[in-house]
């Protein structure tokens, strides 16, 4: 046996077998994700216990639970899209304004006339098209215009909200399309359609983020854009797609909001950007990008919605709710930083 053969066949000493490190890394990642979700479940359960103790049957009644889920469904769909953008290293402050513009454009007299004459899906298509168009503009400005995401989406926030006010003349537009309202007011086995839409969007979002090439590229772009580019990923195009996806989610949320309120208004979507970002952050998605979780976002949305419901049932002020939400966000970010330092170590 020559020296080269002996070196090649000599057993490894002083370390783990080849290939064990990656497996251990994956196991650690899954374990940390499971731990975060467990913490969110515990927090949600504690909130529910507080609701039962302080509000009794008013909180525990099935109608109230369905109300919580209905309220969570609209902002939940926006938060799913926001999870993709933040995981990809971006942020969007214009989602509330895009929801408002989509709702106004979809409920104009012209759009409703087309919907009544042909099919109510024209109203849905209009909202989705407006949301997607705003997302494309955001993506192009950020990816190809090299404008910082914060500034580009802040400009979209002002422009979209202003355009919604101009189109509606700052008046609430009532929806008068019977087929549309009948469809979205329906229930399947006692579960409202709006809740089902939220569940479907969440499941699709989880599959796309965790089981597709698009999801893997999103993690790569958010973790290290330059390394992703060197690996052959078209980072600019992917960024545009991420913001377009969020725009579509805003369009879906606008349709759900129209169905819930039977109106289109320039005031719709107020502070949705803050609620969505907060839900994503406490759900475990890193603001710096590279790590995201759809399940965590869903729990984050449910936690905030349940918190608001408990405060409302106990006649506590909106200001107190805002203080509580702010405290939760700060705690979540501090925990993220601590977990990040431990992972680095």
Image (tube, rainbow, N blue to C red):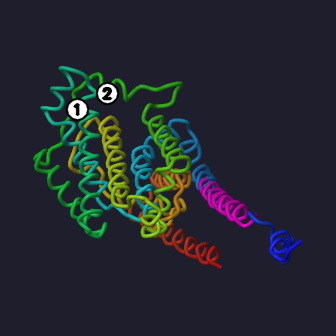
Q: Nearer the viewer, residue 329 or 238?
A: 238
**What residue is at 83 percent from the left and 71 percent from the top?**
5
Q: Is residue 42 in sight in this rendering? A: yes
Q: Is residue 313 visible?
A: no
Q: Looking at this rendering, what residue extends furthest in the top direction?
A: 117
- Out of 17 and 254, give the one closest to the viewer: 17
Residue 181 circle label: 2
The quadrant holding residue 113 is top left
Spot occupied by residue 163 in the image (x, y as percentages of width and height): 14, 52
* Residue 296 locus on image (x, y percent): 55, 55
Residue furthest to the front: 2
* Towards the viewer: 123 or 261: 123
Q: Secondary structure at mark 2?
A: helix
Quarter of the rendering occupied by the N terminus = bottom right
Taking the image as shown, residue 190 lies to the left or right of residue 272, namely right
Which residue appears at 20% of the width and 42% of the height?
Answer: 104
Q: How many labels sit on residues?
A: 2
Stretch of the chain drawn in magenta: 20-44
Say which residue label 1 marks.
Answer: 175
């Amino acid at each position: 046996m020559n020296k080269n053969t002996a070196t090649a066949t000599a057993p490894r000493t002083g370390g783990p077998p080849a290939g064990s490190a990656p497996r251990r890394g994956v196991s650690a990642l899954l374990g940390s994700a499971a731990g975060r979700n467990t913490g969110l479940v515990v927090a949600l359960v504690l909130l529910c216990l507080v609701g039962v103790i302080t509000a009794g049957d008013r909180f525990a009644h099935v109608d109230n639970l369905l109300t919580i889920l209905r309220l969570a469904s609209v902002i939940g769909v926006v938060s799913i899209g926001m999870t993709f953008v933040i995981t990809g290293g971006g942020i969007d402050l214009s989602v509330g304004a895009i929801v408002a513009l989509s709702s106004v454009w979809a409920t104009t007299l012209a759009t409703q006339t087309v919907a009544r004459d042909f099919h109510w899906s024209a109203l849905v298509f209009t909202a989705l098209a407006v949301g997607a168009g705003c997302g494309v503009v955001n993506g192009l400005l950020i990816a190809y215009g090299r404008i910082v995401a914060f500034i580009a989406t802040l400009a979209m926030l002002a422009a979209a909200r202003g355009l919604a006010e101009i189109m509606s003349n700052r008046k609430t537009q009532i929806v008068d399309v019977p087929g549309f309202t009948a469809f979205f007011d329906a229930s399947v086995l006692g579960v409202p359609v709006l809740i089902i839409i939220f569940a479907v969007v969440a499941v699709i979002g989880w599959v796309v983020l965790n089981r597709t090439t698009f999801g893997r590229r999103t993690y790569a772009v958010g973790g290290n854009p330059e390394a992703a580019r060197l690996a052959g990923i078209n980072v600019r195009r992917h960024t545009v797609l991420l913001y377009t996806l969020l725009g579509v989610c805003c369009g879906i949320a606008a349709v759900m909001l129209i169905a819930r309120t039977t109106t289109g208004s320039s005031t719709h979507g107020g502070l949705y950007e803050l609620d969505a970002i907060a839900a994503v952050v406490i759900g475990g998605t890193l603001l710096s990008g590279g790590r995201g979780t759809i399940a965590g976002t869903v729990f984050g949305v449910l936690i905030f919605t349940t918190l608001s419901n408990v405060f409302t049932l106990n006649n506590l002020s909106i200001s107190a709710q805002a203080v509580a939400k702010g405290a939760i966000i700060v705690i979540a970010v501090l925990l993220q930083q601590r977990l990040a330092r431990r992972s680095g170590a």
